[in-house]
Amino acid sequence: RNNVGVQGLADAAEKAEKRIIELDAMTRALHVRLDKAETSAQNACAQLLAVQSDLLVAHEERDEALDGAVHAEEAARDSENARVRAVAASTASRNHEMEDLKRHLNEVEVGAEDVRQR
């Protein structure tokens, strides 16, 4: 009877040893998977940081382009205003010259009439 009990304990120990070996192999396999997952996560983080950096640069480039467009619009407005002022000044100058010419012509006509009357 003692042998039966000892044999049962030996069988149980052998069964437990096999289970320990299986679980140990599973643990090693899971550690390998975990290491790969950690590496993959680190790579994903590095990619995320690179994309975020590119996004920041793109935002800055867009902001600079918008600022440039605003400055270009202001310059175009200033140029148009200067053109309008130049046209107005030219028109005023031409009108002034026309008035001077009319006055001078009138003076000549008055002078010619004086000469005719003498």
Image (cartoon, helix red, strand yellow):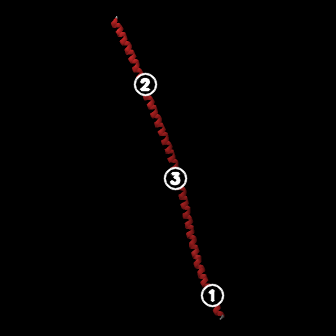
The total of numbered circles placed on residues is: 3
Residue lying farthest to the left in this orientation: 116
The residue singled out by tag 3 in the image is 55
* x then y, percent, for residue 90: 42, 26
In the image, farthest residue toward the right: 2
Dot 2: what SS? helix
Q: Relative to residue 101, is residue 8 depicted above or below?
A: below
Front-most of residues 63 and 52: 63
For marks 3 and 1, give the CA distance: 66 Å
**Within 10 Å of the Cα at label 2, are there few (<14), some (14-19), or many (20+) other Cα atoms?**
few
Query: Which residue lies at the image location 60% right of the left edge and 79% below the top edge?
Result: 20
Question: Is 43 located above or below residue 15 in the figure?
Answer: above
Horizontally, is 54 left or right of 8 in the view?
left
Q: Position of residue 105 (x, y in %)?
A: 37, 15
Q: Would you say 87 lies left or right of 49 here?
A: left
Amino acid on which disc 1 is placed: Ala
Q: Is residue 77 above or below residue 49?
A: above
Give percent across and percent down for residue 79. 46, 34
Q: Which residue is mark 2?
A: 92
Residue at numbered disc 1: 10
Front: mark 3 or 1: 3
Residue ID at (38%, 13%): 107
